[in-house]
Amino acid sequence: MSQSAFETTDALVGVIMGSRSDWETMQAACEILQALDIPFEKHVVSAHRTPQRMVDYAGSAAGRGLKVVIAGAGGAAHLPGMVASETNLPVIGVPVQSRALQGLDSLLSIAQMPGGIPVATMSIGKSGAKNAGIFAARILSLADDQLAQRLDAFVQKQTQDVLDSADLE
Ligand code: RP5
């Protein structure tokens, strides 16, 4: 395979998005990965505007050591599906909330994959991005006991935070 434009780092998760305008949403995934001490990389990769960069990214991802790809896109959101067609790594799709159709277009574009090319589709927007980070952690924790413990602590804290503020005045 020809050399990739993407560097090999210690990243286990690749967070990609179709446009810089998706960052406000996708940073929620990165915040979770950071909190759980999971090495990740982040790039803008567009299925439509930079198709060759997208093929390079997906084709080189496993060889560069990535284990999971989180891909966010809005509107005609083909990025997660196209990446999933060029790698056998698990791809988690995040439907970014679009201006015209509030993300329903993104959701359907990502969820309605043909049989044979799966994309794990999250909910629309920041909560979907957050869950994508947690879902990536769940996948990686299957082979990493220390990460599994950090994830467990994260969930326990989340539960405790809700319990601590559960009684309304
Ligand atoms: C998609 O088009 C991107 O994922 C983004 O959500 C949407 C709009 O992109 P911009 O016009 O803001 O660059 O490809």
Image (cartoon, rainbow, N blue to C red):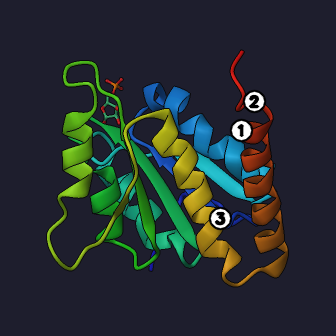
User: Percent position (x, y) of residue 127?
Assistant: 50, 39
**Which badge, 2 or 3, comes first in the chain's sequence?**
3
Tell me the quadrant of ligand 1: top left
Q: Mark yes or no: residue 52 visible.
A: yes
Q: Quadrant of the N terminus?
A: bottom left
Asked whether 167 or 71 is in front, the reply is 167
Secondary structure at badge 3 equals: helix
Question: Distance of mark 1 from mark 2, alpha carbons?
Answer: 5 Å
In the picture of the structure, the residue carrying the numbered disc 3 is 137
Residue occupying the far top of the picture: 169
In the picture of the structure, the residue carrying the numbered disc 1 is 162
Type of amino acid under label 3: Ala
User: Percent position (x, y) of residue 87?
Assistant: 39, 75
Asked whether 51 or 37 is in front, the reply is 37
Q: Say above or below: 13 vs 32.
A: below
Question: Mark 2 vs ligand 1: CB under 8 Å?
Answer: no
CB under 8 Å between callouts 1 and 2?
A: yes
In the picture of the structure, the residue carrying the numbered disc 2 is 165
User: Percent position (x, y) of residue 107?
Assistant: 26, 44
User: Which residue is rendered at x = 38% and y = 55% of the image?
Assistant: 54
Secondary structure at badge 2 equals: loop
User: Which residue is rendered at x = 71% and y = 38% of the image?
Assistant: 162
Type of amino acid under label 2: Ser
Secondary structure at badge 1 equals: helix
Numbered disc in front, either 2 or 3: 2
Q: Residue 86 occupies which quadrant of the picture? A: bottom left
